[in-house]
């Protein structure tokens, strides 16, 4: 499903938002967002392709948790809203579920629980996960306006893009999953 015209009543979540080439917003330029909530009250998700300048062990140490045996596991910048808050996106492996977590798609959950960080630090948390600092958020009607202006392409979530560290590569692969690339999208817009 690819769309750019969505009403406020349509529930877009879960989906992926792919920034259109030429988006001039410095933070969201070439971004891919996993949209996890959408209603008449607004929308929210996490940017999948912005790696933070610190690793998980450094972050855990800064919170007072013991260093986990995770090596240099990356951390991502999930968006500009509440950048001090962490969200953990993880594959549900049938283990413990955490307070305040939601199922994004079957088998994929998002948690704001400190308990998941404690489990990760202890080496007993989810095996396939990403920690995102902050989130992307839109007020009522804001995302719909951006979609109407052609700022984003929407598609079904592509789980193969999760937890990758090559930011622009994730964006290019997201476009390719739609059967296009940067040059063709720009050319199609110019011809329209």
Image: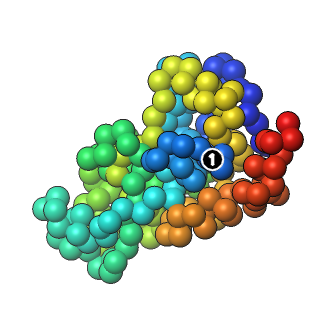
- Pointer 1 local density, CA inside 10 Å: few below 14, some 14–19, many at least 20: few
Residue 103 visible in the current orientation: no
**In this figure, what is the number of numbered marks?**
1
Residue 141 visible in the current orientation: yes
- Residue 45 appears left or right of 1: left
Q: Position of residue 156 (x, y in %)?
A: 71, 47
> Which residue is nearer to you in this view: 95 or 179?
179
Q: Which image quarter holds the N terminus?
A: top right
Q: Which image quarter holds the C terminus?
A: top right
Is 163 above or below relative to 190?
Answer: below
Question: Quarter-wise, where is residue 35 in the image?
Answer: top right
> Which residue is nearer to you in this view: 164 or 182?
182
Q: Which residue is mark 1?
A: 22
Which residue occupies 31% across, 40% down? 82
Which residue occupies 49% across, 69% down? 165
Which residue occupies 38% across, 42% down? 80
Please tell me whether mark 1 sits on a helix, a strand or a loop.
loop
Is 141 above or below relative to 91?
Answer: above
Q: Position of residue 26 (x, y in %)?
A: 46, 47
Q: Position of residue 183 (x, y in %)?
A: 76, 57
């Amino acid at each position: 499903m690819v769309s750019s015209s969505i009403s406020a009543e349509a529930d877009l979540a879960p989906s992926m938002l792919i920034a259109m080439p030429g988006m001039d917003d410095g933070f969201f330029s070439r971004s891919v967002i996993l949209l996890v909530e959408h209603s008449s009250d607004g929308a929210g998700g996490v940017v999948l392709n912005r790696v933070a300048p610190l690793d998980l062990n450094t972050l855990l140490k800064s919170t007072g948790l013991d260093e986990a045996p995770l090596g240099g596991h990356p951390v991502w910048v999930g968006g500009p809203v509440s950048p001090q808050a962490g969200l953990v996106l993880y594959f549900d492996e049938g283990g413990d579920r955490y307070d305040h977590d939601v199922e994004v798609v079957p088998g994929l959950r998002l948690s704001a629980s400190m308990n998941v960080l404690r489990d990760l630090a202890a080496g007993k948390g989810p095996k396939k996960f990403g920690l995102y600092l902050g989130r992307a958020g839109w007020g009522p009607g804001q995302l719909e306006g951006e979609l109407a202006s052609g700022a984003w392409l929407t598609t079904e979530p592509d789980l193969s893009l999760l937890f990758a560290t090559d930011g622009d590569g994730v964006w290019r692969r997201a476009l390719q999953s739609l059967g296009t690339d940067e040059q063709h999208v720009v050319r199609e817009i110019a011809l329209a």
